[in-house]
Image (tube, grey):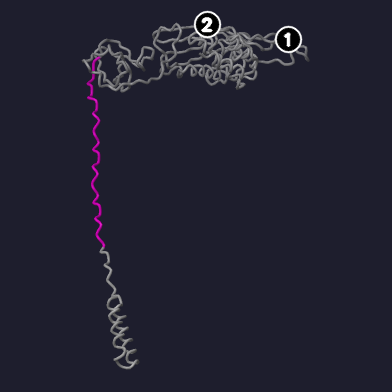
Amino acid sequence: MKILVILFALMVLCTGCGPAPEAVATQTAIAATAIAASWTTTPTNTPTATPTNTPTATPTNTPTATPTNTPTPTPVPPVSVASGNTKLRNGPDAAYPVAGKVDKGDQLELQARNQDGSWIEVQMPSGDKAWIPVEKLKLSEGMTGTLPIITEFLPPPTPIHGWRGDPVQTLCLALEASYTGVYHQENPDVTLGPGDSDYDDIYKEIQSYVSQLGLQSVSSDGVCHATLTVKLMINMSGAYYRGQTSGKTMYCYDGASVSGNVALASSEANLSYYESKMRPGANPETRSGCPMISRFFGESYFVALQGMRQMWGDRVLLFPVRGNQTDVVQYALQEMITLGPRGKQFVPELIKCLKDSCQPFGTDEIVRALKSITGQDFGEDAANWQQWWDKQKP
């Protein structure tokens, strides 16, 4: 700015004594050009940012956790059995079935123990595992302390009334059935045995009762804790009738009488009960048809059921209730009616059955059973029965 002011002053001073105006103008233009040239900004080189090498993070080797070896319990050497004829069981209690026997001095490998250490799981020579009371083993102090503890077990089988043998989990099931009475006399060659549809139906029904007890069943020649044998004598009863059309007299089978023994036996104990059930015929004076064979399944099932009831208690009466054999359902419900207030265990299932219409032809008997057991009367109204029963629960 100072340069511009000085040049302007010099131009003014020289105006009167200098050359002609044209020359002055020319000089002025030249000077202005020079000045303008001196004002031209020389571009400065903006420094280009030199890229800096951002250091690449060198991956650090994160130390991998070295797996720690969980200390394996120190193997416990085999131990000796302290007394002879010792029973090994399927669970840590005398209520479990016998899995085998060992003698004094036999060597067993320890596997685990129960919570309080009163029973020890061992491996038998066969490789199978079973339980033995701790006092039956020769153990050093603290020997069982490192054994794994098992706290959950399947429940033991249902106890059997009057049974003096070992607990029973698996049954060999045997059925013996034969005809008797007039029908047998007239048809001596007709028998009941495996492969016969009537025999097989009875066998399967009894097998279902065993299953509902929570037990296993195998054939009569299988491996089991005891044998359940049902022997049935089937008498298809009848009477002489006069035909409506022909007027002839004929013998017709329309009733049944079944009797027999239900027995449970093992090498240590046995139980046996005699049962019978009769269904009388209609006995009209005349008939339009004459059946040559009478139904006897309900009576046969009921004889087996009653024998098993003697052994495993009243709860077996519920087993046929959801089945499709009307006669045995009726018989079982009649027994519940007879029990009255002692049959409270049946109430939840009877209400459920009423709700589900599980026995459309036995609804009246179900209601009668509920009334007899509870002293209440809600008819066929399952919802009201359920509401009342819910209030009875503690």
Q: Earlier in the sequence, mark 2 or mark 1?
A: 2
Q: Return the residue nearer the eye: 43 or 270.
A: 43
Q: Residues within 10 Å of mark 1 (few under 14, many from 20)?
A: few
Q: Quadrant of the N terminus?
A: bottom left
The three-letter amino acid code for the residue at tag 2 is Tyr
Would you say the magenta stretch is mainly helix, strand or loop?
A: loop
The residue lying toward the viewer, choosing from 230 and 168, is 168
Residue at label 1?
284
- Callout 1 amino acid: Pro
Residue 141 horizontal side relative to residue 361, left or right: left
Q: Position of residue 68 (x, y in %)?
A: 24, 34
Where residue 156 sits: x, y (%)? 41, 16
On residue 87, which mark appears?
none
Q: Which residues are magenta?
A: 51-80
Q: Secondary structure at mark 1?
A: loop
Q: Which residue is mark 2?
A: 274
Q: CA distance from mark 2 to mark 1?
A: 32 Å
Q: Is residue 204 above or below residue 313?
A: below
Rendered location of residue 319, percent (x, y): 54, 16
Give the quadrant of residue 141. Answer: top left
Can residue 304 be seen in the rendering of this structure?
Answer: no
Residue 64 at least partly seen: yes
How dense is the environment of label 2, judged by Cα within 10 Å: few (below 14), some, or many (20 and up)?
A: some
Q: Is residue 307 magenta?
A: no
